[in-house]
Amino acid sequence: DFDGTLAGSDKLISEPVKNAIIRLKDFDITFLLASGRNFHGIISGACQELDLKAPQITCGGGEIVDPVNRKVIS
């Protein structure tokens, strides 16, 4: 989840959280966001900021989006 979990009330992802997510790659763990928000905007920006490549769950589960090409997969 993005709001209140990944990011604070200021909608920013803290450095410790960023570092923890980036370190997951060291353990071959895929990280993705699940959000009620649509992909474009804050979720897209978070994917870029965190260098996320796996499909992201958006629109409350209504869409699965490839963050690399920004296309809806399902």
Image (cartoon, rainbow, N blue to C red):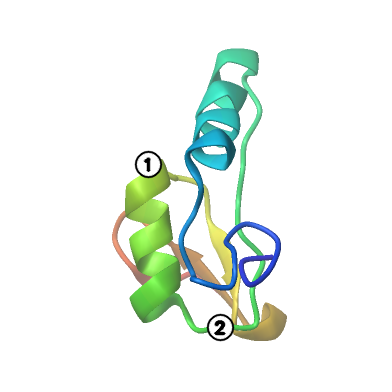
Determine whether the residue tagged by mark 1 lies in a helix, strand or loop: loop
Place of residue 33 in the rendered image (x, y in percent of width and height, measured from the top left): 61, 59
Q: Amino acid at mark 2?
A: Arg
> Closer to the N terminus: mark 2 or mark 1?
2
Label 1 neighbour load within 10 Å: few <14, some 14-19, many 20+: few
Place of residue 15 in the rendered image (x, y in percent of width and height, measured from the top left): 47, 38
Place of residue 44 in the rendered image (x, y in percent of width and height, measured from the top left): 37, 66
Residue most toward the front?
10
Place of residue 63 in the rendered image (x, y in percent of width and height, measured from the top left): 58, 79
Side of 5 where 70 appears, left or right: left
Q: Quadrant of the N terminus?
A: bottom right
Side of 40 where 10 appears, left or right: right
Q: Amino acid at mark 1?
A: Asp
Q: Please tell me which residue is depicted at 70% across the width and 61% down the height of the picture.
A: 5
Give the residue at mark 1.
51
Determine whether the residue tagged by mark 2 lies in a helix, strand or loop: loop
Q: Please tell me which residue is depicted at 35% across the width and 78% down the height of the picture.
A: 41
Give the residue at mark 2.
37
Location of residue 53 by image quarter: top left
- Decide: is 21 above or below 63: above
Location of residue 56 by image quarter: bottom right
